[in-house]
């Protein structure tokens, strides 16, 4: 009887591990949510506060904020982000362009829509709006 209980516990543990490992992976937004016909990336009202800051909060701020910001790059404030936006490092990094450190480091590249939003904001002068 004890042998049967041990086997069932081992089976339960293997099942839980299997679920944990298959549920923890990182895919790009396009792969998880393919574009619905007729839907488009809205680039008409891209602003720092309503568009860019949330993208940074989701993808960048965990490593690039505060006094201990990785590589001294701060993305959680307009002041910090505008520096790398205006010198080209922001878009170069998030678009994985040659010669730039690909970001997010170790993660999937941002969605094409988010890349387009960042480019639109940078091309418009990276305003604090």
Image (cartoon, rainbow, N blue to C red):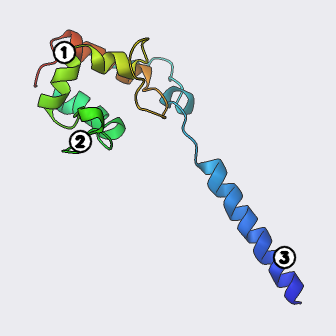
Q: Quadrant of the C terminus?
A: top left
In the rendered view, tell whether residue 111 sits above or below residue 16: above
| The disc label shown at residue 65, or none | 2
Q: Position of residue 79 (x, y in %)?
A: 11, 29
- Kindly identify the residue that appears in the image at 40 percent across and 18 percent down: 95
What label sits on residue 7 in the rendered view?
A: 3
Q: Which mark is residue 48?
A: none
Q: Do the residues bearing badges 1 and 3 touch, measured as CB atoms within 8 Å?
A: no
59 left or right, relative to 20: left
What is the C-alpha distance between the residues marked 2 and 1?
Answer: 18 Å
Would residue 4 be visible to someone looking at this image? yes
Furthest residue in direction front, as rendered: 71
Mark 2 residue element: loop
- In which quarter of the view is residue 34 placed? top right
- Using the image, determine if residue 39 lies above or below residue 23: above
Mark 3 or 2: the one toward you:
2
Mark number for residue 86? Answer: 1
Residue drawn at the location 58% of the way across and 48% of the way down = 24
Foreground of the two, 109 or 48: 109
- Count of marks overlaid on the render: 3
Q: Earlier in the sequence, mark 1 or mark 3?
A: 3
Among the two numbered marks 3 and 2 on one chain, the one whose residue lies closer to the N terminus: 3
* 71 with respect to 33 (left or right): left
């Amino acid at each position: 009887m004890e042998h049967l209980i041990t086997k069932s516990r081992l089976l339960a543990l293997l099942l839980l591990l299997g679920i944990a490992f298959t549920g923890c992976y990182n895919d790009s937004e396009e792969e998880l949510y393919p574009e619905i016909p007729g839907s488009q990336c809205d680039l008409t009202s891209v602003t720092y506060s309503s568009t860019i800051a949330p993208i940074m909060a989701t993808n960048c701020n965990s490593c690039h904020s505060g006094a201990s910001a990785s590589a001294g790059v701060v993305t959680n404030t307009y002041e910090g982000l505008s520096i790398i936006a205006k010198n080209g490092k922001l878009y170069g990094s998030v678009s994985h362009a040659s010669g730039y450190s690909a970001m997010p480091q170790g993660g999937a590249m941002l969605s094409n829509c988010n890349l387009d939003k960042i480019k639109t904001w940078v091309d418009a002068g990276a305003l604090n709006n």
